[in-house]
Amino acid sequence: MTWMRWAPAMDQALYDPDGGFYRRPEGPAGHFRTSVHASPRFARAVARLLLEVDAALGRPEELALVDVGAGRGELLTGVLAELPDRVRARLRPYGVEIADRPAGLPSTVLWTDEVPRGVTGLLFANEWLDNVPLDAGELDEDGVLRYVEVDTGTGEQRLGEPVSAADAAWAARWWPAEHPGDFVEFGGSRDAAWAHAVAGLERGLAVAVDYGHTADRRPPLGTFAGFRDGREVTPVPDGSCDVTAHVALDSIAVPALHSLWTTQRDALHALGVTGARPSLALASTDPVAYLRALGGAGEGAELTDPAGLGAFGWLVQAVRMPPLEILGGRRAWNP
């Protein structure tokens, strides 16, 4: 057995150059379905959001689209296809990913393993933070919060040493452990990763989309999960499967920025994506258009399903720009 804390175990399993899950040639789409893979309507909504950001920024000479955790560039490719030529001519698209540049990606895309600095535009991170490694802890019978260790070969867990002062302080603020057996997933590493990404914006909008929770709904048993070949599996950090954990969407918010928390369902509705079925009258006048619209309605319903992808959390933060009216009506922006 090889026992490790969850953070180094996740890092090795997902990102090790000699066998990490995200180094595999098939990419995430070979194992699980994200909103990007579910429908081109998601890319269309992100393109509309980018146009709103562009207008709010006064249509800068160079407009950045930064896709953090870009996978194999599917979202970037989809958004580029939806933009008018006048915007595409000013666009500087970045794919931020540790994997090698995928074949067939548009030549205008800059592929990098570092978030660019000093850019103006939209930074979008879809299902990225749930794969940022983090440690977990559990309150023992004596009231001591200890790290949880995992066997990298089996996924079996045990209690380890007491947690650091920094993780204890994070838990006290964001995820208090009060009773023996209480489980905590320490989000400090995600907070730092998001703050570093947002700091790359000189001006613009930063959006994190992920499985998430807030202080009023912390999961009592934790959220570690594994995915392989389209199925949920035991989260064994051996490189054979994705290992993920939900995101504390309230703690990651960078202080002093205007912030909006909402659901994917509400965000996509605001951006024009719904699951509304087309009128039956269209079936008699234009059957082909009716079938096309019906298929689009099914895709929209999947993206906004409150029991599925629609339940994802969106954290939206404005950096040196006014809050967007198109989203501001959904929940109050908080300073």
Image (tube, rainbow, N blue to C red):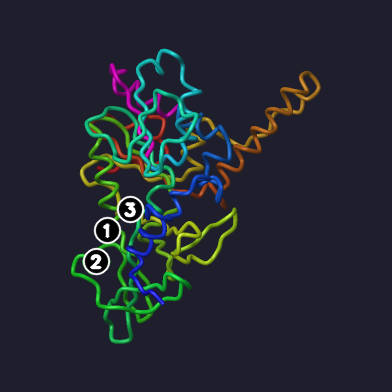
Q: In which quarter of the image is residue 143?
A: bottom left
Distance from disc 3 to disc 2, alpha carbons, whole Å, reads 16 Å
* Magenta extent: 48-68
Q: Is residue 62 within the magenta segment?
A: yes
x and y, in percent, of residue 89 in the image? 38, 15
* Residue nearer the viewer, 132 or 290: 132
Residue contact at pointers 2 and 1, CB within 8 angstroms: yes
Distance from disc 3 to disc 1, alpha carbons, whole Å, reads 12 Å
* Residue nearer the viewer, 103 or 298: 103
Q: From this viewpoint, which residue is outermost toward the right?
A: 284
Which mark is in front, 3 or 2? 2
Q: From this viewpoint, which residue is outermost toward the front?
A: 18
Q: Residue 250 carries which label?
A: 3
| Mark 3 or 1, nearer chain start | 1
Q: Residue at x 37, y 75 (%)?
A: 182
Tell me the kind of residue under disc 2: Asp
Tell me the kind of residue under disc 3: Asp
Residue 68 higher or lower than 248, as above or below: above
The residue beneath circle 1 is 188
Q: From this viewpoint, which residue is outermost toward the top?
A: 86
Q: In which quarter of the image is residue 12?
A: bottom left
Residue 113 higher or lower than 290, as above or below: below
| Mark 2 or 1, nearer chain start | 2
Q: Which residue is drawn at 42% across and 54% down?
A: 212
Which mark is in front, 3 or 1? 1
- Mark 1: give few (<14), some (14-19) or many (20+) Cα within 10 Å: many
Q: Quadrant of residue 65?
A: top left
Q: Residue at x 37, y 64 (%)?
A: 9
